[in-house]
Image (cartoon, helix red, strand yellow):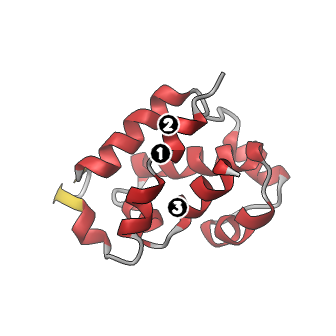
Amino acid sequence: MPKIGKLVSHLPYFESVEGRGTASMVKEANLFYVDYEEGLRSFVADFHDSGIADTSYTETLANAGIRSSDEMASAIPAADEAVLRAMLTQMVREERFSSGALARYANDGVIAEVLRRLSE
């Protein structure tokens, strides 16, 4: 059974960093790697331990009509749990290919909004 509650417990952190600027969440960065502050690193570790990752996240998002990060953000209010899980998986996985992606999602309030929806 997925541990959604542990992820939702990170909501206060994500509410506090919303709009704060991505640089404030980064301890060290280079072209290929970003070392985040503890709150973001802890969330990523809990995500990997939670069991909510959607291994078919690209298909789940495509089936929901979501093809971009802008579409993902605007789809949050109507998304069901499966789509919300796919969104979080996309955000965490995107970091592997685009250093700083998680900080951008956190700064823009996208992670906080997904966690709010998962807590409903």
Residue 13 position in % (x across, y down): 38, 57
**Mark in front: 2 vs 3:** 2
**Label 3 – label 1 distance at C-alpha:** 11 Å
* Amino acid type, residue under disc 3 in the picture: Ala
Task: Looking at the picture, tell me which residue is in the foreground, 25 or 8.
Answer: 8
Earlier in the chain: of badge 3 and badge 1, it is: 1
Q: Residue furthest top?
A: 1
- x and y percent of residue 47 in the render? 48, 37
Residue 44, can we see it? yes
Give the label on residue 9, or none: 1
Tell me which amino acid carries mark 2: Lys
Q: Which residue is mark 2?
A: 6
Do tag 3 and tag 1 residues touch (Cβ < 8 Å)? no
Label 1: element kind: loop
Looking at the image, residue 51 sits to the left or right of residue 74; the answer is: left
Q: CA distance from mark 2 to mark 3?
A: 14 Å
Badges 2 and 1: C-beta atoms under 8 Å apart?
yes
Spatial separation of the CA atoms under disc 2 and disc 1 = 5 Å
Task: Identify the residue shown where x is 64% and y is 49%.
Answer: 119
* Residue 43, above or below 26: above
Does dot 2 land on a helix, a strand or a loop?
Answer: helix
